[in-house]
Image (cartoon, grey):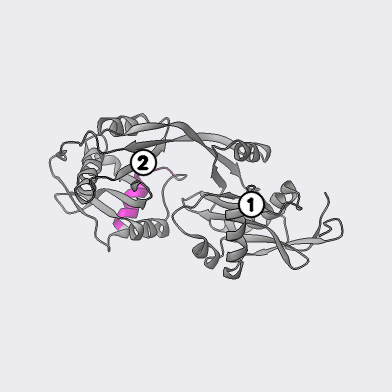
Amino acid sequence: MDLQRSALWPRPLTPDDRWQLLDAIYTDPRTYYYPGWGSLPEWLAQGLGWGLMSDAVLVAALVAVPETDTWAWLRLFTARAEVPQDLAWRLLWRAAAPTLHAAGITHVAGLGGRTWVDRFFRQRGFQAETALRLLLWRAAPLPDAVTPPAGVRITRLASGEVEAATAVDRAAFGPAWRLRREIVQRACAQARLALAARASSGDLVGYALFTPSPQGAHLARLAVHPQWQGRGVGRALVAAGLLQLHAEDPGLWISVNTQSNNAPALRLYDRLGFVAQDPDVPVWVGRLPVAPTFAPTAALARG
């Protein structure tokens, strides 16, 4: 393929692109891929990806998924070896911007931790905004049951409580980290164990979601309403989850990640026996173009 003679133009990815993208994910070491709450088929069906074409061949692709009020997470970026990576990124970045802006997105975030990935983000103007710390609980020591504060009980989160869980999430986190309703719904559907903290009135004041993982389970979400934070609700939720999952499978390990500067969360997990794993993983964040001017017309490739 002679890119000096070929036109490159973007188009939305479709479910028919799945197999080409999977081939890149599994065989191309230059492919960036981090699965999240959804799956590649779901993202393609929802129109969350953009591809770059040359002579009717898909030569690059980008998937960015809106997950919070203002952030989308980069889940996939790939470009064939003969395509200048910087050119592919610029064309797809501009193609994605209008749709993401329409969804209220101002920034795109991605996980680093590998040398080439960190360099990739840095070269494209992303900033290392924070870092995530992975912690692992290996069932030793087994925590004692934690009594929730007076007026609160720990129960199962019901399948019909997505709205209530979303309301807690929105109160507990700032715009960049609070999950959209559709993401809360998907997370609840994926949960191996979903627990709720309820006030005596019956209102939901916190929730915890444990999802399946290769090592057993992952504490994927812990949210407590600000009015109840600092009173032991979060610790009671996590302890109840550890004890219940351990009773079901004494050999499982449970992972969790949190921001490396989130001292209250780190103290909570340390008290329950979680052990930090090195190294921390940087979160890279880039601002979308403020006023996208890109139109989906053919762009002549230059090396």
Could you tell me if the residues under marks 1 and 2 are in contact, i.e. CB atoms within 8 Å? no
Q: Does the magenta stretch include residue 170?
A: yes
Of the pair 126 and 190, the residue shown nearer to us: 190
Q: Name the residue under label 1.
A: 28
Q: Which amino acid does label 2 sit on?
A: Val
At label 1, which amino acid type do we have?
A: Asp
Residue occupying image coordinates x 19% and y 36%: 143
- Left or right placement of residue 77 versus residue 187 in this view: right
Closer to the camera in the image, 32 or 195: 32
Name the spot of residue 146 as percent of width and height, x first.
16, 38
Mark 2, residues whose alpha carbon is within 10 Å: few (<14), some, or many (≥20)?
many
Measure the C-alpha gap from mark 1 to mark 2.
Answer: 29 Å
Give how far across and how far down residue 111 sits, in percent. 53, 42
Residue 12 against residue 86 in the figure, above or below = below
**Where is the N terminus found, in terms of image quarters?**
bottom right
Q: Residue at x 30, y 38 (%)?
A: 137
Q: Residue furthest bottom?
A: 16
Report the magenta residues as a range: 164-174
Of marks 1 and 2, the one in the foreground? 1
Choose the circle earlier in sequence order: 1 or 2: 1
The quadrant where residue 254 appears? top left
Magenta-colored segment: predominant secondary structure? helix
**Residue linked to disc 2:** 256
Q: What SS does tag 1 mark?
A: loop
> Residue 228: image x %, image y %?
24, 40
Residue found farthest to the right: 5
Horizontal placement of 57 versus 218: left or right?
right
- Relative to 189, residue 118 above or below: above
